[in-house]
Amino acid sequence: MELILKEFNLKLKHTFTISRESIDFQPSLIVELRNNGFSGFGEATSNPYYKTTVSVMIQDLEKIRNLIESVKNETPDSFYDKMYPHLKHDMFALCALDMAYNDLYARQKGKKLYDLWKYDIGKNPLTDYTIGIASIEKMVAKMQELPWPIYKIKLGTSEDIAIVTELRKHTNAIFRIDANCGWTVDETIKNAIELKKLGVEFLEQPLKADNWEEHKEVFKHSVLPIIADESCIIEEDVAKCTGHFHGINIKLVKCGGLTPARRMIIEAKQLGLKTMVGCMTESTVGISAIAQLLPQLDYVDMDGALLLAKDIATGVTIDFGKISYSDLDGTGVTLI
């Protein structure tokens, strides 16, 4: 098996702002695994919040190149177990590698990945489309630029209720709110009351990640469901979220890829938590991997590639929230 690493700097259509940063470009690493004429693709993007860079991911993967390339006839679960001890300090690199191996494995079996897992795609959830923080006028303009059935609105400003009030005047779409750790307990409880009146479905990660007692307080008193993001990173975090959140948002890059994400989904369902998978600002490589999990999810946020000025791959396509799969096996990805 051959390991190929490719760096990209993904240009965004618009400056993307959340409560803690703004970006115009998103550095991304594409991992390609080749074997017997087949290729599998995976992706992980840099992220300053998690102190992850493309150069560090490349260094970590190069250190175990010989181990990766020596693998023969392993299942994705077995492959993940072999790689985890060497990459547990770099879950982003592990994600790209695991994603690529799952894709390669399914292609070699002549199956789409969701078919290999025996998932029924008949009732997939729609994806939301994200509106980053900007002036109210620009946020309205972004929404009008792409009419959509569900919008995820980034908040964490002094004008949060005013923003949603104005956006509501221009659409009947479902709203989801992501405060990216930008609120206090009192703000969350009070804002939830007003936001529910404005057609908001749930709140995502309103408080800082490690404020577990405060999360419990919000969980008890919020009139809207609360979904964990920064508080639910790896498999061990799922159980902690019970009694603190109503659901979890799994990010593949944070948890280490598709293999652990599937286990997290199973555990969350057993614990009565809603399941969601979210994206970073990724190309269609990462988005097509997320799409394989759709049948197991209550919600999904997989609009990353729609935010790009230019994509680097083909794979799944999205139209008014609905995901259509590629005709190709695996995750269906081809680099452009």
Image (tube, grey):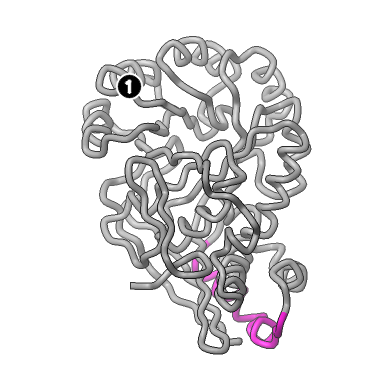
Give the main secondary structure, helix, strand or loop, of the magenta stretch. helix
Q: Amino acid under label 1?
A: Asn
Nearest the eye: 204 or 303: 303
Q: Quadrant of the N terminus?
A: bottom right
Residue 268 located left or right of residue 45 = right
Which element carries disc 1, helix, strand or loop?
loop
Q: Is residue 61 magenta?
A: yes
Image position, residue 207 (x, y; %): 59, 28
Residue occupying the point 60% across, 18% down = 185
Q: Quadrant of the C terminus?
A: bottom left
* 197 is higher (above) or lower (below) than 150: above
Q: Residue 94 occupies which quadrant of the picture?
A: bottom right
* 166 is higher (above) or lower (below) than 15: above
Residue occupying the point 62% across, 38% down = 275
Image position, residue 147 (x, y; %): 27, 35
* 266 is higher (above) or lower (below) than 326: above
Q: Specify the segment rendered in magenta.
A: 53-73
Nearest the eye: 245 or 285: 285
Residue occupying the point 45% across, 69% down = 328
Image position, residue 102 (x, y; %): 61, 68
Q: Is residue 38 magenta?
A: no
> Which residue is denoted by mark 1 in the rendering?
172
Q: Residue 159 occupies which quadrant of the picture?
A: top left
Residue occupying the point 70% across, 85% down = 72
Residue 25 located left or right of residue 206 = left
Residue 15 located left or right of residue 28 = left
Q: Residue 111 occupies which quadrant of the picture?
A: bottom right
Image position, residue 306 (x, y; %): 33, 50
